Image (cartoon, rainbow, N blue to C red):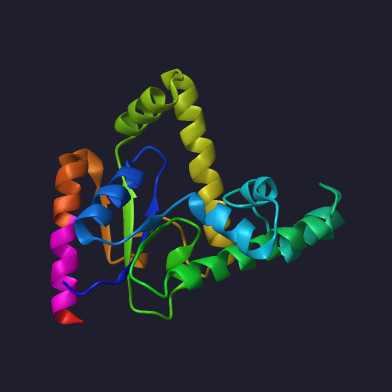
């Protein structure tokens, strides 16, 4: 099988991490998720803690932040906007470097960063009840708190993606394949994705 770079965007609790891990084993290629932050920090001599705080958080554009400040609704912190944008740029450079070889990259707007390359774009979602249960069990928190965390994280991921790309996070037409892990479970979902990648390779 020809090997491509695959990007995976995911809802919190959808099992996107598990799908990426299993798919990487079947394809024989590495996957990168949160370790992208570690690699970025090492490559550019940055603080990993700062990068964590500035990625996948709610981000407002320069003009939006300025407009809100002018209206007196908040303080305008130019340095914060610049630091957010620089963090995105550094992370993007790491993604581009990793994508020089076949791999799976999870999150971080990778589908947009690599839009000029031949990549396979996947979005992983799941039903709310399954997402809440998975997060509750994996983090050892109540289902109520899991639900709050899911809403907050999805909101931040969408804001981060939408502010840095010309697309909208989670819209099916932005991806080659959108799959709901609640329908078939993780293993069957990976089966379908593997077959899809085979078919994609035959046509490219």
Q: Look at the picture and state if 105 lies above or below 10.
A: below
Task: Examine the structure image and report whether residue 201 is included in the region drawn in magenta.
Answer: yes
Left or right: where does residue 19 sit relative to residue 73? left
The location of residue 122, given as percent across then percent down, is 31, 60
Q: Pick whichever, 54 or 146, lies toward us.
A: 54
The location of residue 139, given as percent across then percent down, is 44, 26
- Residue stretch in magenta: 193-202
Image quarter (top left, top right, bottom left or bottom right) of the C terminus:
bottom left
Task: Examine the structure image and report whether residue 126 is included in the region drawn in magenta.
Answer: no
- Say whether residue 26 is visible: yes
Q: Pick whichever, 133 or 137, lies toward us.
A: 137
Q: Which residue is drawn at 13% across and 71% down?
A: 199
Q: Residue at x 70, y 57 (%)?
A: 46
The location of residue 107, given as percent across then percent down, is 45, 55
Residue extending furthest toward the top: 142
The location of residue 188, given as percent across then percent down, is 14, 46
- Say whether residue 113 is visible: no
Q: Look at the picture and state if 36 lies above or below 155.
A: below
Q: Look at the picture and state if 49 lies above or below 193.
A: above
Q: Which residue is drawn at 14% across and 52% down?
A: 191
Residue 28 location, quadrant: bottom left
Count of number-bearing discs? 0
Left or right: where does residue 170 sit relative to residue 63? left
Image quarter (top left, top right, bottom left or bottom right) of the N terminus:
bottom left
Q: Which residue is drawn at 60% across and 52% down?
A: 55
Q: Is the magenta stretch mostly helix, strand or loop?
A: helix
Q: Look at the picture and state if 146 lies above or below 124.
A: above
């Amino acid at each position: 099988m020809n090997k491509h770079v695959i990007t995976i965007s995911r809802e919190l609790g959808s099992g996107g991490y598990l799908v990426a891990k299993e798919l990487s084993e079947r394809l024989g290629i590495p996957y990168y998720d949160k370790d992208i932050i570690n690699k970025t920090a090492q490559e550019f001599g940055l603080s990993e803690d700062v990068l964590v705080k500035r990625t996948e958080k709610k981000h407002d554009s320069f003009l939006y932040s300025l407009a809100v400040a002018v209206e007196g609704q908040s303080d305008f912190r130019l340095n914060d906007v610049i630091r957010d944008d620089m963090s995105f740029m550094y992370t993007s450079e790491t993604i581009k470097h990793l994508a020089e070889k076949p791999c799976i990259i999870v999150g971080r707007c990778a589908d947009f960063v690599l839009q000029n390359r031949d990549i396979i774009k996947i979005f992983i979602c799941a039903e709310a009840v399954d997402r809440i249960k998975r997060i509750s069990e994996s983090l050892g928190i109540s289902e109520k708190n899991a639900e709050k965390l899911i809403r907050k994280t999805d909101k931040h991921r969408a804001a981060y993606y939408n502010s840095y790309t010309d697309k909208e996070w989670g819209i099916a037409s932005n991806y080659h394949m959108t799959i709901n892990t609640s329908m078939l479970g993780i293993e069957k979902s990976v089966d379908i994705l593997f077959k899809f990648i085979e078919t994609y390779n035959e046509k490219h």
